[in-house]
């Protein structure tokens, strides 16, 4: 079932760390003074990114997780997104930062934002480690973006191919050899 592939390093661990630090600085400045920020990680791909990001934030934060899964034919223009695991906490009146690994077509983020907006947070912002703008099928754009990347399939730093390679410390591009 697994095709043969090699992984070419695209973004080094060092570059990721520097970018995460810069993002955290911008986010800390934006939310300065808040005592009610909830950082929401979208499982599973954001787990390493959110762990590094919250440790660089100069703010009191709570951390919560939400798991969404897309299904159906990915070539369809409107993909459905299911919520597999909802937040544990309430977000009404709270400042919320949604953290995603990659914004690809944008359907996941679009759906999650729609869901969370209905719960009346005070502020709702988004941060994605990677953005593939050429793949977008929705109008959604993250407020904070780590790196814009071309339309390549990537793994590492929490991101998987068939559940593998999440533990790579860098972002690599998958090249199929058969
Ligand atoms: P979207 O709904 O199309 O924006 O999909 C976002 C989700 O698809 C991401 O959170 C990832 O889990 C997954 N995804 C998109 N591109 C890649 C990739 O290059 N490698 C691994 N997973 C990806």
Image (cartoon, helix red, strand yellow):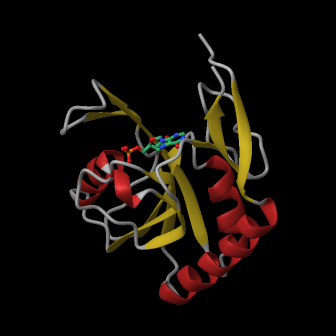
Relative to 36, is 113 above or below? Answer: above
Residue 139 in view (yes/no)? yes
Which residue is rendered at x = 54% and y = 80% of the image?
A: 27
Q: Quadrant of the C terminus?
A: top right
Q: Quadrant of residue 176?
A: top right
Percent x, y of residue 151: 46, 50
Percent x, y of residue 153: 54, 41
Residue 59 in view (yes/no)? no
Q: Nearer the viewer, residue 54 or 73?
A: 73
Q: Is residue 110 left or right of residue 67?
A: left
What number of labels is visible? Answer: 0
Q: Nearer the viewer, residue 9 or 21?
A: 9
Q: Nearer the viewer, residue 14 or 65?
A: 14
Q: Is residue 168 left or right of residue 173?
A: right
Q: Quadrant of the N terminus?
A: top right
Q: Residue furthest top?
A: 1
Which residue is rendered at x = 52% and y = 79% of the image?
A: 35
Q: Is residue 16 left or right of residue 26?
A: right
Relative to 100, is 159 above or below? Answer: above
Percent x, y of residue 136: 31, 54
Q: Quadrant of residue 93?
A: bottom left
Q: Nearer the viewer, residue 44 or 117?
A: 44
Relative to 52, is 109 above or below? Answer: above
Percent x, y of residue 141: 34, 66
């Amino acid at each position: 079932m697994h095709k043969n592939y090699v992984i070419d390093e695209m973004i080094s661990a060092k570059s990721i760390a520097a970018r995460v630090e810069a993002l955290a600085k911008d986010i800390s400045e934006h939310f300065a003074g808040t005592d009610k920020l909830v950082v929401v990680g979208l499982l599973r791909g954001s787990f390493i990114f959110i762990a590094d990001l919250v440790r660089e934030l100069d703010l009191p934060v709570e951390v919560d997780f939400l798991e969404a899964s897309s299904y159906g034919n990915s070539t369809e223009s409107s993909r459905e997104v299911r919520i597999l695991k909802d937040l544990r906490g309430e977000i009404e009146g709270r400042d919320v930062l949604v953290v995603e690994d990659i914004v690809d077509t944008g359907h996941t983020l679009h759906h999650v934002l729609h869901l969370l907006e209905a719960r009346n947070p005070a502020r709702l912002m988004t941060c994605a480690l990677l953005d593939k703008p050429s793949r977008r099928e929705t109008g959604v754009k993250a407020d904070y973006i780590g790196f814009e990347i071309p339309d390549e399939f990537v793994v590492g730093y929490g991101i998987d191919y068939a559940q593998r390679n999440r533990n790579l410390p860098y972002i690599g591009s998958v090249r199929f050899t058969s």
